[in-house]
């Protein structure tokens, strides 16, 4: 997840003065002034998976203006069923939403705030990443409740069409792309969703994006799900949900380093301020629902920061000063200061916040301030929805 700085573009006042050769003539002048644009907003795009008996039947994404004080929740944008992951393009003009039970990806134009035509993906889109040059996206195909898939679907963002799938390990979940755009790393989680056949995975698949081929898999802990790459492109951090650990991987050699023990079932990770921020779910006596900071320079974990119930996913703000956690059970979007490690004022987001990504958007661009509570459909495509990600007792 890359960190981008917000840029305010200031218009210049242009003054035109009429000049005449006759020194005694009356001089006239006209002034045309262009007012500077308003500073942009930082918008969190939050995927709503549904709550309670409707978990898995959510069909919307809501924009949350986190620049305003207090933060304001915008009108829901309709997407596919069970929006499972969100990614924002490098130019902050497009968001892509992976819809788990619709087998589609929904593009959202961030300038108009409108959803575009859905793009077909493989079975069970679970994770999504956009290449640094903005030309392609890559979607992990996890499978359904009855089958375990093993592919990544590339999408050409110039045509909005899917390309030939790339075979990886079973049950791919998280995906991250190196800053230079040469490699992707895919967390092959295996059967981490209740009802799926097969075993829990323990590998990460590197993909050579020039050839579109997966390389030799890297062994990590059990149930790898979340994945992030440091801004310098040297290290991948993978959350091993069923091993209570995080595995660093050296990008240059595709080599796993010593795992880092954490206090819970790690489900998601992002990098900000030289720290890998790891979201923990409850497991093995650990209460979870916290974010554990791991210093990238020495792989040393710090004191976990408690957040709301159902902590599920995490994303860094574009300026890298705040990380935002989607807390499914509490219907809250919770910010943590990167320098202070303190929780700031949470934002109520009803409908089951499941995934989040942030973008810098010009004021007035598809981000209405007022909305009603988003609704979730009582029916959905496919069978019973998957549970939100939590550690299980299954073994490899």
Image: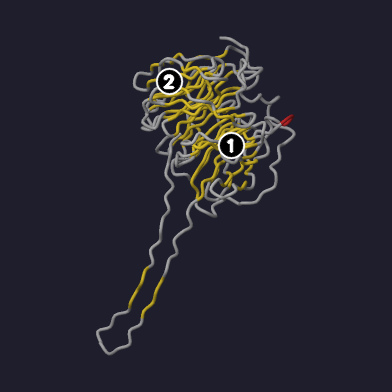
Q: Where residue 354 sits in the image (x, y, percent)? A: 61, 32
Identify which residue is drawn at 53% across, 48% down.
67
Expressed as whole percent of the image width and height from the top left, the position of residue 177 reads 43, 30
> Which residue is under mark 1?
334
Q: Provide the secondary structure element on which disc 1 rests.
A: strand
Q: Position of residue 133 (x, y in %)?
A: 40, 38
- Quadrant of the rendered image containing residue 320: top left
Image position, residue 270 (x, y; %):
48, 30
Helix, strand or loop for disc 2: strand
In this orientation, does residue 352 appear? yes
Q: Is residue 119 visible?
A: no
Task: Decide which of 172, 367 is in the foreground and name it.
Answer: 367
Separation of marks 1 and 2 at Cα, in angstroms = 26 Å
Mark 1 vs mark 2: which is more N-terminal? 2
User: Label 1 crowding class (10 Å Cα cut-off): few <14, some 14-19, many 20+?
Assistant: many
Q: Nearer the viewer, residue 279 or 366?
A: 279
Q: Which residue is mark 2?
A: 248
């Amino acid at each position: 997840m890359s960190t981008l700085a917000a840029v305010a573009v200031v218009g210049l006042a242009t003054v035109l003065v009429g000049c005449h050769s006759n020194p005694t003539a009356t001089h006239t002048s006209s002034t045309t002034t262009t007012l500077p644009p308003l500073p942009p907003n930082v918008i969190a795009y939050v995927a709503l998976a549904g709550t309670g008996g409707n978990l898995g039947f959510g069909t919307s994404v809501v924009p949350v203006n986190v620049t305003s004080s207090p933060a304001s929740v915008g009108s829901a944008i309709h997407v596919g069923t069970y929006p499972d992951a969100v990614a924002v393009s490098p130019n902050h003009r497009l968001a892509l939403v992976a819809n788990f039970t619709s087998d589609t990806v929904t593009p959202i134009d961030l300038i108009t705030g409108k959803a575009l035509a859905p793009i077909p993906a493989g079975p069970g889109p679970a994770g999504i990443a956009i290449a640094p040059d903005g030309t392609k996206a890559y979607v992990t195909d996890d499978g359904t409740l009855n089958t375990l898939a093993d592919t990544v679907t590339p999408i050409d963002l110039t045509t909005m069409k899917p390309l030939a799938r790339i075979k990886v390990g079973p049950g791919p979940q998280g995906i991250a792309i190196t800053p230079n755009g040469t490699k992707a790393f895919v967390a092959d989680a295996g059967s981490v969703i209740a009802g799926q056949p097969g075993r829990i995975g323990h590998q990460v698949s590197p993909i050579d994006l020039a050839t579109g081929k997966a390389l030799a898999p890297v062994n990590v802990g059990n149930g790898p799900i979340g994945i992030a790459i440091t801004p310098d492109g040297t290290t991948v951090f993978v959350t091993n949900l069923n091993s209570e650990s995080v595995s660093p991987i050296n990008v240059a050699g595709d080599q796993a380093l010593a795992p880092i023990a954490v206090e819970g079932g790690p489900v998601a990770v992002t990098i900000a301020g030289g720290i890998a921020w790891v979201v923990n779910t409850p497991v093995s006596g650990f209460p979870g629902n916290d974010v554990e900071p791991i210093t990238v320079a020495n792989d040393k974990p710090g004191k976990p920061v408690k957040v709301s119930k159902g902590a599920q996913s995490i994303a860094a703000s574009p300026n890298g000063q705040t990380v935002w956690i989607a807390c499914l059970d509490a219907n809250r979007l919770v910010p943590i200061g990167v320098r202070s490690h303190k929780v700031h004022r949470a934002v109520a987001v009803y409908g089951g916040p499941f995934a989040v990504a942030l973008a810098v958007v010009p004021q007035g661009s598809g981000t209405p301030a007022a909305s009603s509570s988003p609704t979730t459909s009582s029916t959905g495509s496919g069978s019973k929805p998957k549970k939100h990600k939590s550690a299980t007792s299954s073994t490899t």
